């Protein structure tokens, strides 16, 4: 791979801010899914043989869908955390390097060295 990577803290900040809204969207999808299920309660009966055969699978499928939606919510939270963590590391490294460069300039200045 050729080329050069250049860190973009401002871009990471913007990306993190944009990703920050995704967990709430996933949560709303899950909440809407739960609310929508009320429209289908009773369609397979309540206590007959058909209900006994179909209801457990119906509930399991709903739980599986809801679990997947909640997993997206968790993944988005983790992604946001990773983006901001990466940004903190980049900014910290840049600031640390700048501090070290300033310290070296100060040492050279105090020893009568030339500024370059």
Image (cartoon, rainbow, N blue to C red):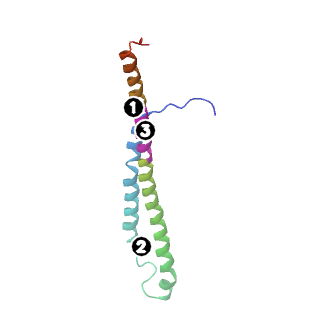
Q: Which residue is mark 3?
A: 12
The secondary structure that dominates the magenta segment is helix
Estimate the spatial distance between the alpha carbons at disc 3 and disc 1, rounded to whole Å.
16 Å
Of 79 and 100, which appears nearest the observer? 100
Q: Residue at x 51, y 80 (%)?
A: 54
Q: Which residues are magenta?
A: 82-94
Find numbered disc 3 in the image and state the secondary structure of the residue it sits on: helix
Image coordinates of residue 27 in percent, x first then y, are 38, 58
Labels 3, 1: front one? 1
- Residue 9 sits above or below residue 112 on the image: below
Of 27 and 99, which appears nearest the observer? 99
Q: Which residue is mark 1?
A: 95
Q: Residue at x 46, y 65 (%)?
A: 67
Estimate the spatial distance between the alpha carbons at disc 2 and disc 1, rounded to whole Å.
57 Å
Image coordinates of residue 43 in percent, x first then y, are 44, 77
Left or right: residue 2 versus residue 48 is right
Image coordinates of residue 25 in percent, x first then y, are 39, 54
Mark 1 closeness class: few <14, some 14–19, many ≥20 residues within 10 Å? few
Q: Quadrant of the N terminus?
A: top right
Q: Which mark is residue 40?
A: 2
Instruction: Point out the tag, 2 or 1, that comes first from the N-terminus.
Output: 2
Of 104 and 12, which appears nearest the observer? 104
């Amino acid at each position: 791979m050729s080329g050069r990577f250049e860190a973009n803290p401002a871009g990471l900040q913007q990306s993190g801010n944009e990703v920050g809204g995704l967990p709430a969207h996933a949560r709303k999808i899950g909440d809407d899914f739960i609310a929508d299920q009320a429209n289908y309660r009773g369609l397979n009966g309540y206590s007959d043989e058909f209900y006994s055969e179909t209801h457990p699978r119906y509930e399991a499928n709903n739980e599986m869908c809801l679990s997947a939606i909640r997993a997206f919510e968790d993944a988005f939270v983790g992604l946001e955390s990773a983006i901001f963590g990466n940004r903190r590391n980049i900014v910290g490294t840049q600031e640390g390097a700048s501090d070290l460069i300033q310290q070296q300039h100060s040492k050279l200045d105090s020893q009568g060295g030339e500024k370059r």
